[in-house]
Amino acid sequence: MLVTMRNIIETIKSVVQEPSKFFKEITKEKSIKEALIFFIIFYGITLLFSFVQSIFSMQTMPGVPKIISYIMLPFSMMFALAISFGSIFLFTLVFHGFFKLFKGKGLYKDSFNLFIYAAAPSFVLGLIMAVINAIVVIISQNPMTIWYLMIPAIPLYLGAFVWNAVLVTIGGSILHRISRLNSFLAGVLMPFILGLVILGFMLLIFGLGLFVFLSQSGFS
């Protein structure tokens, strides 16, 4: 199944409307090529709108020359793409490890394909929000206006997360040939717990750093 701009909409509709049928079909895929193309197309478009918003935001900031905005754009995009690519491959490795822990029989490419395609609801929402944010900033000429969109968007992001979790559970059971319970534990619960642990560690480091700073500044 070759994913291009021509059939990317059909791919999204298939994965969200008929997930069991979709994930059974991609068991035939021999590599991560199609999933990677899907990610590049979707993430690339989203990233472009995000940086359009950033450019207009920087132009409205006092003391920031416009030329700096245009110079920073290509370098920022390349940096963001590099970080995103590295993060996806690294997270998929951890993701794949969790499935192996629960006796998953799939290969790394199965975990990669599952991770990418199951994230379709989040990709769609991310693109929509990037477009809306860019339009709002361009029209208002005030980058702070996007904060008014953050609170209404929270339920949408929570909904997308739940939808992703359902797709991971269904797809993981098919691609790794395990029960849906084990698929949920491996693909949803364990990554969620790991995320909480990482967040807690980061908050701890931040808290310790803030404590040391305040202590040295004479606030304690």
Image: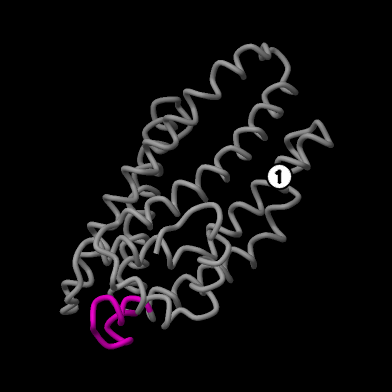
**Magenta span covers which residues?**
171-184
Residue 207 against residue 186 in the figure, above or below = above
Q: Quadrant of the C terminus?
A: top left
Q: Quadrant of residue 153?
A: bottom right
**Residue 95 picture location, percent across and down:** 27, 63
**Residue 199 picture location, percent across and down:** 38, 54
Residue 143 against residue 197 in the figure, above or below = above
Q: Is residue 141 magenta?
A: no
Q: Quadrant of residue 78?
A: top left
Q: Quadrant of residue 134?
A: top right
**Residue 51 picture location, percent across and down:** 60, 33
Q: Residue at x 21, y 62 (%)?
A: 108
Judged by its main secondary structure, the magenta piece is: helix
What amino acid type is highlighted by mark number 1? Answer: Asn
Q: Secondary structure at mark 1?
A: helix
Task: Name the residue that disc number 1 marks.
Answer: 133
